[in-house]
Amino acid sequence: MLEIHSLEKRFGSVTAVDQVSLKIPDGQMVGIIGRSGAGKSTLLRLINRLAEPTGGQILYAGDDVSALRGRELMAWRARCAMIFQQFNLVNRLDVITNVLLGRLNYHGFASAMLKRFTPAERAFAIRALDRLDIAQAALQRADTLSGGQQQRVAIARALMQEPKILLADEPIASLDPRNATVVMDALRAINREEGITVVCNLHTLDTARAYCDRIVGMASGAVVFDGPPAELTIQAAREIYGVDGLDEALSESVTSTSIGPAPGAAGSTSAPSTRTAAA
Amino acid sequence: MSSSVATMTAAEIAALRERFPEALSVDRRRRWTHRAVAAGIVAYMAFCVWVFDITVERLFGGLGKMWIVVRSMLVWKDMASWDYLGIFQGLAETLGMAFLGTFVASLFAVVIGFAAARNVVPNRIIHHLVRRFLDLLRGVDTLIWALVFVRAVGLGPLAGVLSIMVSDTGTLSKLYSEAVENVDRKPIEGVRSTGAGNLKVYRFGYLPQVLPVFLSTSLYWFESNTRSATILGIVGAGGIGMQLSERMKVQYWDQACFIIVLILLTVAIIDTGSKWIRLNLIGRREL
């Protein structure tokens, strides 16, 4: 169980995350939705401790992870894997090495510097790549792959960490609809088959509705909705996105056809917007 | 199927190795090549240490003498009698030499840089000739050019300017041409698609992409030339180096130190200035 208690992050006078409290049971797939700038990315970065909270607490299995330092903090990051909108792979390394980077926390200094990964680790890495259907690119440099392939490499790296939680920060915002579907399907499979908790930032409503067990809506840093997709009414969506943002959120759909017509989803057939979502 | 690294069985690993032999099997030949290269580097280093007779005693004995020089550098005596006018004139001369040399070399390099770029001049013979010519300019060090020009035009800053100009034309042209070769093809195609001729494509497709690189390269070389112009003075090509070498010859270490501090300050100021210029002319994104 991941418990967040009145978590807060302020940048000067701006409050990016404002008194957020959430309880996420193990194995849940949670979609966090909201406009860009609503504090979704900051929230994930706080959970992974890439950013320091200015207030509140994060507990995992009863341990206060917001107080961890040094080695324990790094071990927490390994248990709570993260993937990013821009994939954040090391372009100049080959794919399998990128995936094996997920083991760095499990290695000492010398064996990491010398890339002394065990046969079991290499085999695990290639199997993870194979399951994501990119094993054939294992020896290619990461930057030779397309965006969708790179994001799958990033997922394989996350799996290599053998995490309890997988945080995904706008994983499909830089991808075309087909690749976005592949990536979202992979995240759901990981959640269902491995029982890994997935917390996924999405700025489109339909994707969240189609893939997630639970939806958390954020606006100006605060949680304004928390419940199952079925409870996400048009009024609730309007509160999350504001009146102007709603059409946009609905139109950037990934799999709007795979689920029944969502309330007010009339705009979902229009062409994807070219807006680039800021993280 | 095991879901963790720790529980991977030997059979599972073997099966995966069978399916993905390239990714999983250790490339023995490559490993041994790496080891051989590493051994070669170590052996060469050891050989050099042996040939140059580098020993611990000699290193520490030298340090003792260094200390005497350092001490006399730090105690500044008779400061009222120092020839400040000469020193600052020399500094100004050095700056002028570096600026003039780099500036003229940059102008040449814009033209030669394009001519030396494979994507602009695809003719392999011309490309080759230009490249070898640049190698010649670059391969001969600025210092050698300075000695040549001091003979040709006499002692003084002109020899310095010419030597910086010639050797930097070589270096800058090469760096510029690499920038030109690394341009993004897409905007160039975009400009060509509008019906623009070659020169217009260079001007609007290439130049906006390479200009930031050109500018920051030249600014860096201006700074670097200010430093190396110091050495040029030592062989008689004018500037602060002449002042410095004269004082070191007669062991005025304190004055030499003063000059070195001035050079360091000047370089720091140029560095700050060029940062500012880059920021304002190129914009923050490229930095």
Image (tube, rainbow, N blue to C red):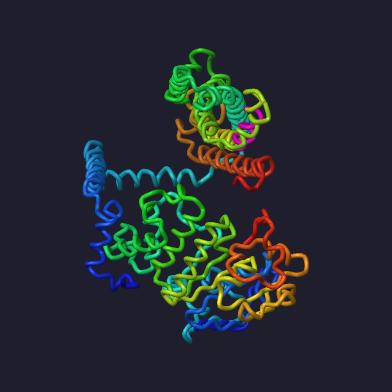
Quick one: which residue is furthest to the right in this view?
Answer: A243
**Is B55 displayed left or right of B151 in the figure?**
left
Q: Foreground: B86 or A248?
A: A248
For the point 46% across and 50% down, the residue is A145
For the point 42% across and 42% down, the residue is B69
Magenta part of the chain: B202-212
Picture coordinates of residue B175 (x, y %)? 51, 31
Picture coordinates of residue A91 (x, y %)? 46, 51
| Quarter of the figure with residue B269 | top right
| Quarter of the figure with residue A15 | bottom right
Q: Is residue B233 visible?
A: no
| Quarter of the figure with residue A256 | bottom right
Picture coordinates of residue A2 (x, y %)? 51, 81
Q: Is residue A118 above or below residue B259?
A: below
Q: Main secondary structure of the magenta part?
A: helix
For the point 39% across and 47% down, the residue is B67
In the picture, the quarter occupied by the C terminus of chain A is bottom right
Q: Is residue A109 above or below residue A28?
A: above
* Residue A100 is one of the magenta-drawn residues: no
Q: Foreground: B41 or B185?
A: B185
Q: Foreground: A156 or A254?
A: A254
Q: Foreground: A193 or B46?
A: A193
**Is A131 displayed left or right of B195 in the figure?**
left
Give the tally of numbered discs: 0
**Is B46 displayed left or right of A90 in the figure?**
left
Quick one: which residue is furthest to the top in this view?
Answer: B152
Q: Is residue B129 visible?
A: yes
Picture coordinates of residue B281 (x, y %)? 68, 40
